[in-house]
Image (spheres, rainbow, N blue to C red):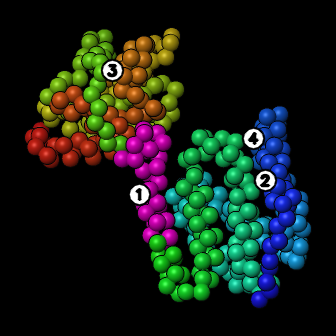
Amino acid sequence: MKNTTISLSSYKIILIPVVFLLELSLFFVAVKYFGQQTGVLVASLSIPPIMFFVTKQFFPEVVAPRWLALTFWGFILELSTYPFRGYFGGMQASTLCGFAICLIATFLLIRKDRENTEPWLIALYILIGVSVIQLPVRIYDFTGTLISLPDYLAHVLGVVVGLLLYHRHKIVQTINLSISILLVLFVYFYGYSMWETKLAYGTFTGKVYKKIPVDLRLTDINNTAVTAKKGKLTIMDLWFVRCGACFEAFPEFQKYYNQHKNNPNLQFYTVNQPSSGENVSESFKMLKQRGYTFPMATAGYDNTMVRSLGIRAFPTTIVIDQQGFVVYEGDTKGAMATVNNLLQGGISMAE
């Protein structure tokens, strides 16, 4: 095997961050003046010359077409996962399939070229190709791209595990592969849902325990004041008119309401958070025209309820226990699972 050595002089060490800061600067300037799509294009086009410069400085014995091909392969591997996100299972499918694709491709590319290039260097170039679009966008809008962070990390993990399959100790290969597969499967079945809940509602499971700082006083469809009564479990689905996801969640809320509407220990409300100038009665009418029969209320224009509950996103379904504590914030499915657990814990389910 060819021995690829690295000799770093002081000026070369300084050049590494300078070169990549230059690429990021190009990306930010392009985004500022031409939009994010152009910024991604600039970042993608700037990688080859940057990689050429770094390679010539640090790895002169690596033939240019080889590193370029490996980087391009990484880029193609990342692109191959995009259809899974949009059409074949969403982020979970992209996470699982992207991990497998990157692992297998890295393993095969190393096996094909390891006589000419160090395996870790092959994996590095593949990883750069995988990250060529991802990293600039994440640096530019870290918060906005958090939703897909586990997906990207799974792809990186696939490359790393593909490299570690060439570790000289079989036990290390087996342990790394087994732990990584179990981790990705956990993310696929449970982890991504927990991650989405964390980003939207502040917790991984939706479970909270906090006292409501103000009395919940709502106005129902007949303009009559109503209150979330202590001694009952209260399920509230908070929404607003321009929230498409809120309307998508209503059928599920209606289903649970139909199942438990006669239970004296429960009370249900969809709570509209109106915006300034909104006609609340028209909002109620909109829901009734769609055939919904669950109790409807409004929180008023001052946002007091939303602020006091610390609502982070819409729609949010909350569960308030008999003592007036919020015990769940999340989606409707999770809220009803919480309600069922509380019911089974001692509250009568008699209809």
Residue hosting label 2: 17
Which is in the foreground here, disc 2 or disc 3? 2
Q: Is residue 16 above or below residue 74?
A: above
Report which quarter residue 322 is drawn in: top left
As for residue 111 lying within the magenta part, the answer is no
Q: Is residue 324 left or right of residue 179?
A: left
Marker disc for residue 36: 4
- The secondary structure type at the circle numbered 2 is helix
Q: Using the numbered discs, state the Cα–Cα distance from disc 2 to disc 1 in whole angstroms.
A: 38 Å
Residue hosting label 3: 297
Residue 252: give x, y in percent of width and height: 35, 41
- The secondary structure type at the circle numbered 3 is strand
Three-letter amino acid code at disc 2?
Pro
Cβ atoms under marks 2 and 3 closer than 8 Å? no
Three-letter amino acid code at disc 1?
Tyr
Which residue is nearer to you in this view: 349 or 109? 109
Q: Report the residue at 60% width, 77% height from top.
A: 164
